[in-house]
Image (spheres, grey):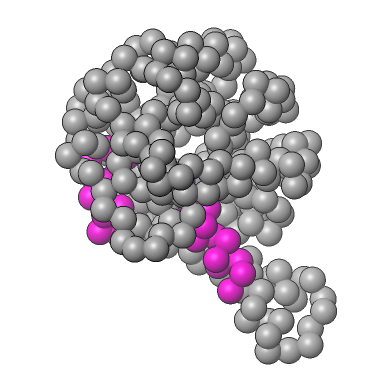
Amino acid sequence: MLVTGKEILDNAHKGNYAVGAFNVNNMEILQAVIAAAEETKSPVIVQTSEGAISYAGMDYLATMVRLAAEKASVPVALHLDHGTTYETIIGCIRNGWTSVMFDGSHHPLDENIAATKEIVKIAHACGVSVEAELGRLGGIEDNISVDEKDARLTSPEEAVKFVQGTGVDYLAIAIGTAHGKYKGEPKLDFERLQTIKGLLDMPIVLHGASGVPEDSIIKATKLGINKINIDTDIRVAFTEGVKSVVTTSDVYDPRKICGPAREAMKKVVMEKMNMFGCAGKA
């Protein structure tokens, strides 16, 4: 069933667990995510980036996810990840997304607040939940690219001002993660997370979680992270699944190539759901 992001994440906030938000670009990834959610009995957030929308088409993605959610036995939210343009965000709201993220983190604080507040006003009027980001993660994800020198951690004081000024439903914070593959082991600022969670008492989001050690993820969840974004780990699983076929045989049937990739992605997603503590929470 298709539900709002707020419904899923308010429950996670109250229950002190995190829900996986998995980026999808095609049918096989979506099927893997939904199958994993059903097998682990987990609520799930299906994410689409602006890059995914450009690749697959807004109407294609909306139709696929809506069908998958209607057939699923677990709660499913359809979320726009890192929306940067008014046109994309409004288009998603019109086409059935139940949650949108406006990423104004590159703007000065007051400008970010003003722009986010306008998106919240529109989305809430349509029954759609809103995520925003404060602080900046380094790395590259689709059309989002931030040099390491421009990355900055989230200020607890600014987080309070931002939430009070915008009315967002959940907030993505920067505590040491980054988008894309890590060159070394990321070190998370747990004290900063604990402080922000205590000040806001609302669902908190962790971006750039692919490649973060399991013990760090579990600790972050216990300290108040309720939505964890996963993209790179799924891409790696897909690629390895394809390689396992095309490098060992002369198979040219797309079904025999994408099938193993789908199973590899499903395994990764199930592992994440158990790690995040959302398994059995549907």
Where 38 falls versus 197 (above or below)? below
> Is 40 or 211 nearer to us in this picture?
211
Total numbered labels: 0
If the image is split into quadrants, where does the C terminus sit? top left
Looking at the picture, tell me which residue is in the foreground, 193 or 112.
Answer: 112
Q: Name the image quarter holding residue 161.
A: top left
- Indicate the quadrant where residue 110 lies: top left
Q: Residue at x 40, y 46 (%)?
A: 148
- Outermost residue toward the front? 149
**Residue 152 visible from this viewpoint:** yes
Magenta residue check for 234: yes
What residue appears at the point 24 percent right and 30 percent down from the top-left corner? 197
Q: Is residue 28 above or below residue 51?
A: below
Q: Position of residue 89 (x, y in %)?
A: 64, 25
Q: Is residue 121 magenta?
A: no
In this rendering, does residue 13 appear at all? no
> Eyeballing the image, is 268 above or below 209?
below
Residue 223: image x %, image y %? 22, 41
Q: Quadrant of the N terminus?
A: top right
- First to last magenta residue range: 214-240
In the image, is 190 to the left or to the right of 234?
left
Q: Main secondary structure of the magenta part?
A: helix
Pick the residue in front: 95 or 190: 190
Q: Which residue: 61% across, 66% down?
A: 238
Where does residue 135 sit, x and y in percent of width and height?
37, 32
Q: Position of residue 34 (x, y in %)?
A: 58, 52
Residue at point 53% right, 26% down?
A: 102
Q: Is residue 249 left or right of residue 229?
A: right
Is 40 placed above or below 51 here?
below
